[in-house]
Each structure stands twice: as C-alpha cells, then as structure tokens.
Amino acid sequence: NHYNDATLAYENACMNAIRYLEKFGYSGPQAYLLLGAAPIEGRVSGVVDIPNACCSLYLPAAIFDDDIRPSASGPVRKDRGSCAVSS
C-alpha cells in the first residue's frame, strides 16, 4: 500500500489525463508526449490527514482542434494516426 502523498497524487492525475485522452483516440505514447509539450498546469488541490493529498491537472482545451471537454454524448473517438508510437 502506498500513502497518497503529493508525488503519487500528481502521478495519478497525469495517468488519469492520459487515460482520458485515450478515449478520444490518442495512443498512450501520443497522450504522454502531448502532456510533455502542452502548457499544462498541475496543482496540489488539497492535503488532508497527512500524508494524503489530492492533485489536479489542467489541460487547456483551446490547443485541440476537437472539443475534448466532457459532454452528455460522450467522447468522440478519432483515428489519430500512428505518429509517436515509438522513438
């Protein structure tokens, strides 16, 4: 078992963002590279009953051609090609 310290909480926020982008057709490596190049904003949202922490990640929707915001219709999956599959 791991305590959810700030480092692990931020890692979880990044992994959740990657999984979220995969719902729109990005591969894992594509989403990882996107998070590395995009102007993301990470925050420690709360530290309650130390060492538990909650972190959030902001990814600006304006950098995408398609709308990636949550909607009632759900994510629209598109073929994003095979770029960034390996390096």
Image (cartoon, grey):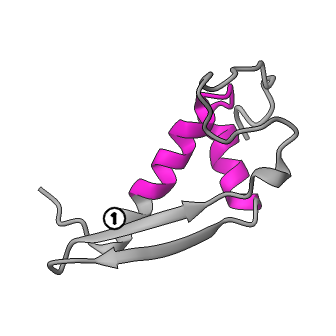
Quadrant placement of the C terminus: top right
Residue 5 rendering spot, x and y as whole percentages:
27, 72
* Magenta segment: 12-37
Q: Does the magenta stretch include residue 83?
A: no
Residue ranking furthest to the front: 72
Q: Please, what is the three-letter code of the amino acid marked with disc 1?
A: Leu
Assign the magenta stretch its main secondary structure. helix
Quadrant placement of the N terminus: bottom left
| 8, above or below 34, in the image | below
Residue of label 1: 8
Q: Does the magenta stretch include residue 33?
A: yes
Residue ranking furthest to the left: 1
Residue for point 60% across, 31% down: 22
Residue for point 34% across, 74% down: 6
Residue 81 rendering spot, x and y as whole percentages:
81, 23
Residue for point 17% across, 81% down: 50
Pick the front one: 41 or 83: 41
Q: Residues within 10 Å of mark 1 (few under 14, many from 20)?
A: some
Residue 24 rendering spot, x and y as whole percentages:
67, 28
Viewed as shown, does residue 78 lie left or right of 41? right
Pick the front one: 22 or 74: 74
